[in-house]
Image (cartoon, helix red, strand yellow):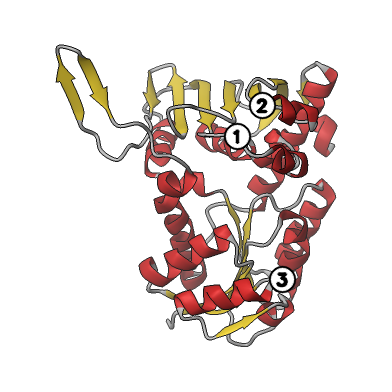
Amino acid sequence: MDRIRIGIVGAGRIGSVHAESITYHIPEAEITAVSDVIGENARRLAERFGIKKYSSDWHDVITSPEVDAVLVCSPTPTHAEITIAALKAGKHVFCEKPVHTSIDKIREVAEAARETGKKLQIGFNRRFDHNHRKVQALAQSGALGNIEIIKITSRDPEPPSPEYAASSGGLYIDMMIHDFDMAMFLAGSDVTEVYAMGTSLVDKRIGEAGDVDTAIVTLTFVSGALGVIDNSRRAAYGYDQRVEVFGSLGMAADENDGDSTVRVSTAAGVTGDKPKFFFLERYMQSFTEELRQFIRAIREDGEVLVGIHAGLMSVVLAKAAKRSLDEHRPVKVSEICGV
């Protein structure tokens, strides 16, 4: 089969990450078009990666006969509209998370994917991380027995600006959404109830903007297992990304990736490298792998590994967490999505 021809909508940071992955690491695909509402951004990305066509109008990408699949890397409020239009234009779609902050809009996207029969993958890249995926494989193989507790730690190296916090949709939708998806991925189960606590200990201005920067959420899964997620917008030692699954027969946990695994032992103590600084260093391999699997699903007419259900439920859990925080009580998932 010929290479899959990719069009990218959105030439910002994540669009650039995906362009790099495809250009240098996925020979089964090529980028044939890119757009960005800021036309200069599209031009720069096109020049950097040798992309022949660029535009300031995303319609030019989704209607191009030289595009088989579209990567939606634009700002969150545009994801659903562009994804639906691309699907209806006969394109396969890879959509960055979140699909939308409206549950009704996400359901419209799901319906468009069902009606058109085109592939739709959601960009939860952490499922493709080499460490997290090994823990998940062990959990789902039965090697750990019945899953009873899941623990996820996710801490950024430094906080965002208060302005970003005010416009991001909040920590639960902007940051913890990855962890909600990871929890369900590790458990092999959806969630029935959410209880959230949060405060502002890192930057009081984030609290003044109506958000939290330090948060703990507990989950109850359909399977009966329990989960705990902790987030912080600041970890002085780097990007802290760890998961653990505890079961009736054992436990599996991963550690942070550093620049090396070298440990130096002297009379003064034992030292090693700090975790990688941020998500581009830590998760670049997973960004490449999620696209490789998307391309494979198209070429082999297989199922995508992260479908629209994951995109829906992660937003449902984020909304449940925010309601729980605001109302100081556990919130049933059914209160949010009606099922």
Marks 2 and 1, how far apart at CA: 8 Å
Q: Are marks 2 and 1 in contact (CB under 8 Å)?
A: yes
Q: Nearer the viewer, mark 2 or mark 3?
A: 2
Please provide percent x and percent y for residue 272: 26, 27
Packing grade of label 2 (10 A; few <14, some 14-19, many >=20) is some
Query: Which amino acid, by three-letter code, is at mark 1?
Result: Pro
Query: Residue under circle 2?
Result: 203
Closer-to-camera residue (129/8): 8
Query: Which amino acid, by three-letter code, is at mark 2?
Result: Asp
Q: Which mark is residue 159?
A: 1
- N-terminal of the two: label 2 or label 3? 3
Q: Looking at the image, which residue is at 78% across and 64% down?
A: 81
Label 2 secondary element: loop
Please provide percent x and percent y for residue 152: 52, 27
Q: Which mark is residue 46?
A: none
Identify whether 79 is placed above or below 103. Answer: below
Label 3 secondary element: loop
Please provide percent x and percent y for residue 193: 72, 24
Query: Which amino acid, by three-letter code, is at mark 3?
Result: Val
